[in-house]
Amino acid sequence: MRSPIEADGFRFIVPLLALTVIFYFLNWAVAMWTMIGLVAFVAYFFRDPTRVGPDGDDLMVAPADGKVAKIDTAYFSEDYPDGAICISIFLSIFNVHVQRIPVAGDVLRKIYNKGKFLAAWNHKASYDNEQNYVALDTKWGKVGIKQIAGLVARRIVCRVKMGQALQKGDRMGLIRFGSRVDLIIPSSAHIISKVGDKVKGGETVMARAPLEARR
């Protein structure tokens, strides 16, 4: 049975619980209750709920919980010289911070780039901030996911490996304490999301595949 808390969270929870026990035996009530509050907060932040997404390879789901902050229909990069669509999702500290695979595919590239720590809602963060980029080979064509660090979120965890075959909704990793995730899809895809939408990773439909990918 999968834990409802992301594995990375136990690095914080275990020592906090140990301190809680110590303060209990020392009869330091204020310190003990402070630790209990911190344990509850960390457990809430690192929660990893079960998600059930829609069936069908023609539907792409959100890679993260949060709010759609920007949709760039003219995104260019080394992997997308002819242009692509980039959908940016802003994660507040209260969102689930586990990222998920938006559509089935094989891992083509995995690149970690060091950079700045601009606020996650700053659109320059997509280019300038420290980030982890994963490219997937899918029926849609090349699909990219960027995990982007922020002003507070400075720890990115990515658990997928080069060449790994992944299914829609599989867990990809997480970013600690508020962040941004970019979803990069072919220009021919039909966008369903719009700026301001609140989305759930692994569940909310973001786009429909181009006609050639539905065959």
Image (cartoon, rainbow, N blue to C red):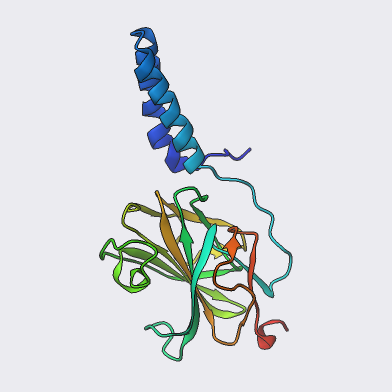
Picture residue at 53% right of the left edge, 39% below the top: 5
In which quadrant will I find the C terminus? bottom right
122 or 79: which is nearer to us?
122
Q: Considering only vertical position in the picture, is 79 above or below 62?
A: below
Q: Is residue 174 left or right of residue 22?
A: right
Residue 195 seen anywhere in this rendered image of the structure: yes
Q: Residue furthest bottom?
A: 82
Picture residue at 54% right of the left edge, 63% below the top: 63
209 or 31: which is nearer to us?
31
In which quadrant will I find the N terminus? top right
Q: Where, by quadrant of the figure, is residue 187 drawn?
A: bottom right
Picture residue at 36% right of the left edge, 8% below the top: 27
Q: Position of residue 168 (x, y in %)?
A: 62, 63
32 or 82: which is nearer to us?
32
Q: Position of residue 120 (x, y in %)?
A: 37, 62
Q: Is residue 123 left or right of residue 53?
A: left
Q: Position of residue 129 (x, y in %)?
A: 30, 66
Q: Considering only vertical position in the picture, is 165 above or below 159?
A: below
**Numbered circles on residues, count:** 0
Q: Position of residue 201 (x, y in %)?
A: 58, 58
Q: Is residue 47 left or right of residue 204?
A: left
Q: Is residue 153 left or right of residue 137?
A: left
Residue 64 seen anywhere in this rendered image of the structure: no
